[in-house]
């Protein structure tokens, strides 16, 4: 990611000491020092020809997180900040969960003893997404953080488009 873009995100969100944790697709995930301690910063560069589509997805992801308050869904800590005019990137903050993703814990202790409770919590997170008619996509271990303290799991929101509020018409005979 361009250092100027990272600096612009830091300034827009009021964070310092932003350091990359990794990325997925077009998104940089960073740990930063925020107003209330450690925070996660998500930063997406908007690159043509997909800038408009990526901007809409980011708006939807942040909008979904803003609308859900559930212990098994990652909590939003800021709104979406658009960097530049027209925006060259977008960023936002999410709560920092000290722990690891489920992928890092597969095959390691505590093993199966926590599995039933983890499954219940993942399903509870799904239920929270489905209440506003949102479909969670890309369910895989890296999208399931496992914090060191309860709750055991929370879901990140890679989301598909909102489901229609009315059912689709029946297929033709």
Image (spheres, rainbow, N blue to C red):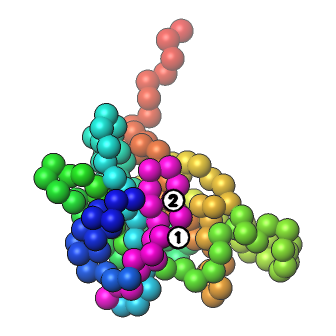
Q: Which mark is residue 23?
A: 2
Where residue 134 sits in the image (x, y, percent)? 46, 51
- In the rendered image, residue 32 lying in the magenta stretch gets the answer yes
Q: Determine if residue 57 is in view.
A: yes
Which quadrant of the figure has residue 14?
Answer: bottom left
Q: What is the distance, in whole Å, between disc 1 and disc 2 at their CAs?
A: 7 Å
Above-or-below relation of 158 to 109: above
* Contact, mark 1 vs mark 2 (Cβ under 8 Å): no
Q: Which is the main secondary structure of the residues drawn in magenta?
A: strand
Extreme residue in the bottom direction: 36
Q: Nearer the viewer, residue 86 or 150?
A: 86
Where residue 65 sits in the image (x, y, percent)? 40, 64
Residue that label 1 marks: 21
Please state the extent of the stretch shown in magenta in the rendering: 18-35
Q: Secondary structure at mark 1?
A: strand
Q: Secondary structure at mark 2?
A: strand
Q: Nearer the viewer, residue 6 or 87?
A: 6
Which quadrant of the figure has residue 18?
Answer: bottom left
Above-or-below relation of 168 to 7: above
Q: Determine if residue 116 is in view.
A: no
Q: Residue at x 53, y 9 (%)?
A: 173
């Amino acid at each position: 990611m361009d250092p100027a873009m990272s600096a612009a995100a830091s300034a827009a969100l009021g964070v310092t000491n932003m350091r990359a944790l990794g990325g997925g697709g077009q998104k940089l995930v960073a740990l930063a020092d925020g107003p209330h301690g450690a925070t996660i910063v998500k930063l997406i560069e908007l690159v043509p020809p997909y800038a408009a589509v990526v901007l809409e997805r980011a708006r939807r992801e942040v909008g979904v997180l803003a609308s859900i308050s559930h212990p098994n869904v990652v909590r939003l800590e800021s709104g979406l900040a658009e960097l530049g005019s027209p925006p060259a990137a977008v960023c936002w903050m999410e709560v920092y969960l000290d722990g690891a993703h489920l992928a890092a814990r597969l095959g390691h202790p505590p093993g199966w003893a926590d599995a039933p409770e983890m499954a219940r919590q993942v399903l509870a997170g799904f239920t929270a997404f489905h209440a506003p008619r949102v479909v969670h996509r890309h369910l895989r271990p890296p999208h399931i953080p496992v914090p060191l303290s309860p709750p055991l799991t929370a879901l990140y929101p890679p989301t598909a488009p909102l489901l229609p509020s009315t059912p689709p018409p029946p297929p033709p005979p």
